[in-house]
Image (cartoon, rainbow, N blue to C red):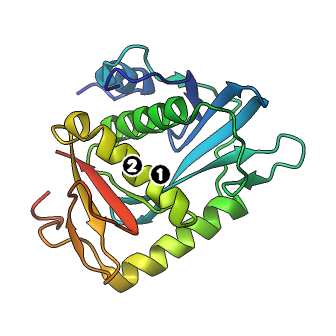
Amino acid sequence: MLRKTKTDILVRVGTKPLITVDPSLPSFEGHPFFEKKANAAKKLFSKVGLPKGISKKSR
Amino acid sequence: MFGLDKYQYSTDKTFMAYHFISNGPQGAIQKIAKFNLIGEDLYNFGFGDLDAVTGDISDTVISDNKDVDVIMGTVGSIIYDFTNIFPHAMVSIEGTNKARTRLYQMNINKHWVRIEPVFDVYGLLEDESWEPFKKGRNYIAFLGLKK
C-alpha cells in the first residue's frame, strides 16, 4: 500500500480552495495564550466529561 | 465552507495553527487560531489577535474592525477544514468571557441550518450538563464533531 503523503491529505479534503500550508508559520505549540486556554478546557472536561452518547465505541 | 464570506487563511505544517488577516477601518490585524489536543480526539479551539512585535496573542482586545461576520465565517471554515483532516476530532469552544461565548452562540444560531447537517453540536449548560445544541438556549461552552 502506498504511503500517505501530505499532498494526498490535501487532495482528499477536496474543498476549494485547498488549504494553504505555510511552512514558515509557527505551530504556536506551547504558546502561553493557547496553553492557558487548553489547561482551562482540560480542567473543565475533567469536571463535566463528554456529552452522553459520545464514546470511542460509538464513534 | 457554507458559502459564507471569509478571509483566506493558511495553516502550519501540523494543521494545528491557522493564520489570517482581518482588514477593516482599524487596519490589518493578524489572527491566529489553534487547536490544542487535550484528550483522546478532543481538541480545544483557541483564537486571538497576534501582536507581531511582541508575539503576544489576546482575545480580550476589541479590535472593532467591522468584519465580525467575515471573521466568524473564517473561523467556521477553519474548523470545517480541521475536521476534514482529523475526522474523529471533537472540538471544544469556550469564549474567554460571556460576551465572546454569546458571540459564538449567536453565530451557531444564525448558521444552524448549514451547521446541523454537517456537525453534531452540544452545548454545556450553566449546571454543567451537556445537551444537544438547541437554538435559543444559553450555553457556557460548545463541543462539535463531524457527523
Q: Identify which residue, A27 or B105, lies in the foreground.
A: B105
Label number found at residue B82: none
Residue at image point 30% right, 74% down = B125
Residue B118 at what x, y percent from top left?
20, 38
Q: Amino acid at mark 2?
A: Met
Residue at image point 32% right, 25% down = A13
Q: Amino acid at mark 1?
A: Leu
Label number found at residue B103: 1
Chain ID of residue with mark 2: B
Residue A32 at what x, y percent from top left?
71, 64
Quarter of the N terminus of chain B within the rendering: top left
Quadrant in the rendering for residue B2: top left
Residue B24 at what x, y percent from top left?
70, 25
Q: Is residue B8 above or below residue B40?
A: above
> Are labels 1 and 2 assigned to the same chain?
yes
Quadrant in the rendering for residue A6: top left
- Mark 1 vs 2: CB contact within 8 A: yes
Q: Identify which residue, B64 or B144, lies in the foreground.
A: B64
Residue at image point 43% right, 18% down = A18
For mark 2, give the secondary structure: helix
Residue at image point 68% right, 61% down = A33
Q: Is residue B12 above or below residue B137?
A: above
Left or right, B64 with respect to A11, comes to right
Q: Identify which residue, B20 or B124, lies in the foreground.
A: B124
Left or right, A52 with respect to A13, comes to left
Quadrant in the rendering for residue A44: bottom left
Residue matched to label 2:
B106
Q: Identify which residue, B25 or A20, lies in the foreground.
A: B25
Chain ID of residue with mark 1: B
